[in-house]
Image (cartoon, helix red, strand yellow):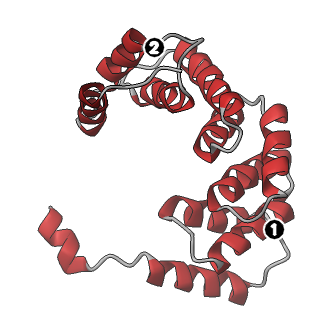
Amino acid sequence: MTLLTEKQKNKLQKLYNQNRFSELAAEVEKISDFKTRSPFLANLLGVAKLKKKLKTNKDWAEARSLFLDSYTKAPTYDDALCNYAHISVKLRDFDHAYLELIKRKKKGYNPKINEALSRIYFFEGKIDEALELFKETEKNDHLTPITASHFLTTMNYSDNFSQDEYLKYCKKIDKKFDINTAELKKRN
C-alpha cells in the first residue's frame, strides 16, 4: 500500500479544500497506482473524479471501480461502500452494492448505510423498506438536509402515512434545519 508523507498529505488536503479536483486526481494518480493504492487513496481518487467540473462517462465508471476497489481492500470502510452504492444507483447497476449493504446493515445501525440502502429500496419500488430506514435514521437524530429531503419525498410514494403524520415529520424536520432569517441575510 502506498504510504503518504506529511508533505503529500498536506498537498492532497489543500487541493481538496480548494476544490481543485482535477489536480487532486492527477496528484493521487502520480503518487500511487491501482495495484498498490491504499483504500483511502482509491476512495479519494473516486471522489475527485466525481467532483471535477467536467465529468465524462469514463469518470463515472472509473469512480465506481475505485470505490469498489477501496471497499474490497477494506471491507469495513463504510464511506467507500456507500460511495460505491450511490454511484451504482446512478448507473442503475446496483445488485452487488445492494447485497454488500444488506450484509453491512446486519452488523448494526449506521446512518450512511441506511441512506445508501434506502436509495436502492426507493429505486426498486420498496418504499416501505426505504421509509423504515429513514425513520430509524430520524429516530437516531442523524438526518441531514439531504436525507431529510429524501425521507419526505419518499413519504409521498406511500399511502401508509396520514396527512397528520406527514405534517408532523415536516414540522420536525423544518425545526431541525431551521436557518435563522437574519443569519441568511448576513451570508448574502
Q: Give the amino acid type for the residue marked by disc 1 in the picture.
A: Ser
Tell me which residue sits at (60%, 11%) in the image.
35
Q: Secondary structure at mark 2?
A: loop
| Residue 41, above or below 130 | above
Tell me which residue sits at (77%, 37%) in the image.
97
How many numbered circles are shown?
2
Q: CA distance from mark 1 to mark 2?
A: 47 Å
Q: Determine crowd level at label 1: few under 14, some 14-19, many 20+ residues with C-alpha closer than 10 A.
A: few
112 horizontally vs 144: left or right: right
From the viewer's perspective, is the residue at label 1 or at label 2 nearer? 2
Question: In front: 146, or 102?
Answer: 102
Q: Could you tell me which quadrant the C terminus lies in?
A: bottom left
Tell me which residue sits at (52%, 17%) in the image.
59
Q: Residue 20 location in percent, x, y?
A: 27, 27
Q: Give the amino acid type for the residue marked by disc 2 in the picture.
A: Ser
Question: In front: 177, or 163?
Answer: 177
Image mark for residue 32? 2
The image quadrant of residue 15 is top left
| Residue 145, above or below 55 | below
Q: Secondary structure at mark 1?
A: loop
The image quadrant of residue 32 is top left
Q: Which residue is mark 1?
A: 158
| Residue 157, above or below 79 | below
